[in-house]
Image: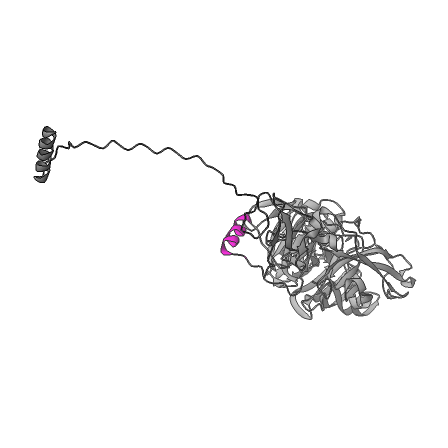
Amino acid sequence: MADELFDLDLQEIGVFGTPWHGKVQGGALTLPNASQMAYQQPSAKATRLDSHDSVCQYFDAAQAGTCHLVAAPGLPAVSRTSEEQAADADAGQQWLTKATLTGGRLQLYGHNLSGWIYIDSVGDRWLVTCPSFWPYPTLPANAKTTALNASVRLTRFGVVPIGGVVPEPEYYDYPVSLASGWLSSASPAEYVRMTIDAITKSGNKCAVGLHSGANEVEGYIQLSLSGLGAAATVGLTVLRTYAQCAAATNNKTMDAGEGFFTGSAEWSFSRLHALWYDDQDDVVEVRVNGTGQYSWDEVVNAGVGSYSYSGAASISLNVGGLDVDSVELAASVNDAFSAGLSTGESVWSIGSQSFPSSWSNSPGRVDAEVDSHIMSGSPSATWSPLSVIFPSAVYTGANGGGGRCAVYAICHSRHCVGLWTSVTMLDNFLNVTSVVAKGRVVATPSGVRGSEVALGVLPSSQRRRDWALNQGAVGWTNNDCYGAWDPLTGDVSLWQSSPICFV
Amino acid sequence: MAKDLTAALHALTQQAQGQTSRQDKMLPSAKDATTIPERSGASGLIQSPGSGGAIVSPLTETLYTERTFHDVRQYKSTDGIFVIELRPVKSINFKDAADIPLVIEFKAKA
């Protein structure tokens, strides 16, 4: 400890830490005085839990904007004279009593920590990393019958070395494990990856999300720490099972025979979409819930008959047990045909937005069963931040034209979640001609922001994120899906075409 | 002699009558004072401290290890993440050019 002491104190120490806070985009930090300074863009790749110096190889837009708050208890307010305040404002500086860990590599002061900060019971700071974590980052096929073993390392952090002489690291390792069977037998056997999704402000809890290839939450495990860093109690528990993340019901009755096909169905689902910690370090669930019903009646005999379909659904965004947004969908199709001639009509709406009028009074049929898509998501949705909730209600016109409506749950960042509706128009060759997209409110840990935002009718050259989902890993710069929430101010920034983050 | 007496008597008579033979003259103008060059003083050899003698520069610290310190003081960054630990100096021993020991004592921050 002696090496960590300065020898002379004839000069008073003023405030120190970092005064640089604001929005970072394109490697530039915009300060409150509107000036900019070069700043390392927070990473869109997550830190590997099992390797402090490595990152996961997949790109994760939701990681790029994620910002975890660090708040040590009992800090005094920053005292600045009026002259100092004026100088701070002139220089674009802000001295705050809180800090942030940003991006997938948990950046502090513009430097990647690749771990988080635990503030123990006496206020000492410890960098938390995992020298080993297995299985990681993907769960093997036999994960259901495999134990999870990890080592959690607490390294003393934040003591400024004297004269540039870095003291020997002081660290303590704590083994943790989950016994075989920790992964619910109901969990899917498919590829699952794990990322740090939420951290309490003192770092005493960390929620690690298990995400499917379609970026759907398959479960959460939690690392918890208590006590002094040198003699800590470290725990590893299952925070949410697969069944708790994805619940669904689907009751279908059907009667079919020669010349007729009739039935009805009611369905519901509740899907965990994100998870936060509140000021009391309690878990806050962000869920997307849905209920719906539809019925159909088709009678055909020798090319003569009728077809009718009607359905309705309600998709809601629920934060901590309260609905903060909902989208109503309705569909009604009636068609009568004789000798190949159709005189059908259809009426669709999504939210307050009706399908384009050109879709109404057109012959055709609903070419998808809604319920089959509710839990699966888009098979090509291999990237975050979107999960498709109510996709592929595809209407196909007589000549091949038509469109598709969908409700998406979007994670701009891990702490910035909302619903998004879109109606996609297809031409007679099934090419997308336009997308009418509407962002809606976004929920953050500091509240719900915004109202329904019309994003306009986009030309095909500016397709948004839903299009990229179907197209694969191309064209990120044209996807205005990036967004971020600032835990220091509560601000949000959405629909950005390049990664953005608050620091 | 007689002449001298007569002249003396005449002079006394005139003086008594307020008359004098002195002729008035102007005083010469004052000369500018010349500058006095700086000089350093020196006393005799100081035989013992405390006898009222002066300190002779330079002061030289005797031994680093003789320093004494106040209790460790911690300075935290505004966000509480980083800490600088300081051990404020309490006293330093010196000797002046005349090899006289001196001590500087620093106050602790209140």
What count of labels does the image hold? 0
Picture coordinates of residue A19, whole percent (x, y): 60, 52
Answer yes or no: is residue A361 visible.
Answer: no
Residue stretch in magenta: A80-91
Quadrant containing the C terminus of chain B is bottom right
Q: Is residue A234 left or right of residue A343?
A: right
Residues A303 and A173: in front is: A173
What secondary structure is the magenta-colored segment mainly? helix
Picture coordinates of residue A356, whole percent (x, y): 63, 55
Residues A8 and A172: in front is: A8
Against A416, residue B23 (above or below) is: above
Residues A286 and B30: in front is: B30
Against A307, residue A28 (above or below) is: above
Quadrant containing the N terminus of chain B is top left
Picture coordinates of residue A466, whole percent (x, y): 71, 52
Indicate whether residue A86 is drawn in magenta.
Answer: yes
Q: Is residue A142 left or right of residue B1?
A: right
Residue at the image position 26 percent from the left and 32 percent from the top:
B29
